[in-house]
Image (spheres, helix red, strand yellow):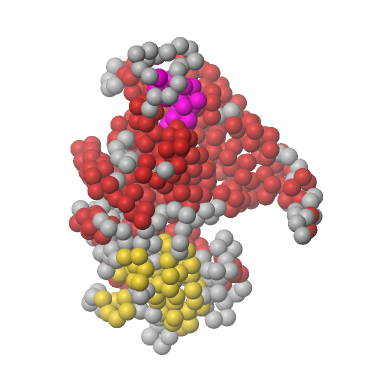
Amino acid sequence: MIQYKAPLKDIKFLMNDVYQFQQHYQQIPGGEEATPDMVDMILDAAASFSEEVLSPLYQTGDKGCRFEGGEVQTPAGFKQAYQLYVENGWQSMSTPVEYGGQGLPMSLSIAKSEMIGTANWPWGMYPGLSLGAMNTIFLHGSEAQKQTFFIPLSQGRWSGTMCLTEAQCGTDLGQVKTKAEPTADGAYAITGQKIFISSGEHDLADNIIHIVLARLPDAPEGTKGISLFIVPKFNVNEDGSLGERNLVSCGAIEEKMGIHGSSTCVMNFDGAKGFLIGPENKGLMCMFTFMNTARIGTSIQGLASAELSFQGALPYAKERRSMRSLSGSKDPDQVADTLMVHPDVRRMLLTQKAIAEGGRAMIYHAARLADLMMAAHTRGDQSLYDQYDDELGFLTPILKAFLTELGYEAANHGVQVYGGHGFIKEWGMEQIVRDAQISKLYEGTTGVQALDLLGRKMLLGKFKAYDHFAQQVKAFTRRTKRPEMKKMIRKLKRNMLAWKLYNYRIAFKASKNRDMVGAASVDYLMYAGYISMSYYWAMMAETAYQKLESGDGDAEFYTAKIQLAEFYYKRILPRAKAHASMMVRDPKSLMQIKEEHFSFLD
């Protein structure tokens, strides 16, 4: 059984040394409460909860949920863990004080979510979905809706979902058919069926608040005619107590490849009472608040898959003996050398480690931006809010798609390190692979995220997002004069310039042939991901050099950071060249084969 251990040293290295969160916290409302002692206490407590409570439930939870009579029973131990989570106030950590929260920075919640998600991703999905519902209600709901729904959600007494997908549409939400009919009391009757609804039904919380996309009567066709509604499992009385059961029910739970401990539900709305949130026919705009939150959360799954698989593979590689080192026996008195002497095993382990630590750096930077964005909202500074939202919007598809693709790769490396034993359930390595697969699918597949990045954020945005990111990288390279990093900085500069030139080439080709966008998009996203991650690795290496010079801290830890950055630049970053070569190819080879010629089977 894999036993998760929170990588607190790596987390604190980013928060304290690379990003200097203590200075950052002084710039945002509520940040003054996040003192060094408070942050350490929170991180240590989250680590203990993840290691001692959630990690032991990961493999046992793979037995899955039970569905009987419309009710879902979560795996053994899940409910008790959730009660402990609520009692310790984890859900309310970063919600506003005026709505029952603790008002701490959102970035602290990201660190908490990383530890919880790595220890037990399926369990973490239950409170994780609630965070998106909370953000949507907080940003777009009325004061009455915040009082009624946000406060119990922030306390963890209630949980939340996102109800978008229907049988005929997933990505293409313009096809949504669920109806919302106005009722005499000012509410709406919601009728339709939603599928693939994570946490749609369970036994953890007293009430479940569904955030539902539906169409009003005479709404325009397509995405311009979709509105957003709050639909509770139990209706809520005026005094806040629970009333009668609403007309929403779980028709089934899906039999899935992975994340068996998370209930994935078919939800039936049979005239259920709902409440409009945000303006009519602007549901997708409001829903993007939820979706961006969920996509950042999903990117954590990429990091989590890499970290957990690495933690499972490393001890095995150190203990398992097989063959001799090619450079001569390292343990001649033993029957064989350990797997650690073999370069290819080290390649897989270091790739896992580089993905996890590089991904963490990218996500924590995004968390910092989320802090600043929410601070701007609190201050009523819409211009600054939009600026940080745009920065986050640029990073979101890269984080979601690039990191989950690499997380899945890292999970497979873990199985490879084990060899045949990795294919056996009792070791737990194959479960990580099965659980990781969904991260590349929900909240928008890799292809959809790639189209969003290249089509909407880059081409339609006239590459403003790239220009802003490039300015940040340029500022870093200008101030980094360290001789030891000369080659790394030169490579980063050249890659950023090449990225800019590729932008022009793709834009020109796309102006002649629109299929160029779809043909280039996934390779473009992966290219952007590898180049972006190289920037974060350079920042970590620079910080590690500074710490070594100061003589403060663990010299071996900082040396390993620098060596891992060098591994990334020499062994992983070169992948970007292949993606660059493919993303500028003419789409003809993709489009010239006739549909009827894809197969000649009788």
> Which residue appears at 73% of the width and 51% of the height?
514
Q: Position of residue 300 (x, y in %)?
A: 41, 45
Tell me if residue 207 is in the magenta stretch.
no
Which residue occupies the extreme front position in the image? 335
**Quadrant of the rendered image containing residue 574:** top right
> Which residue appears at 69% of the width and 34% of the height?
581
* 9 over 367 or under it: above or below: above
Q: Nearer the viewer, residue 51 or 402?
A: 51
Tell me the quarter of the image containing the C terminus: bottom right
Image: magenta residue range: 336-361
Can see residue 548? yes
Tell me if residue 358 is in the magenta stretch.
yes
Tell me the quarter of the image containing the N terminus: top left
Count every numbered label the image shows and give the total.
Answer: 0
Q: Position of residue 80 (x, y in %)?
A: 23, 58
> Which residue appears at 34% of the width and 67% of the height?
72
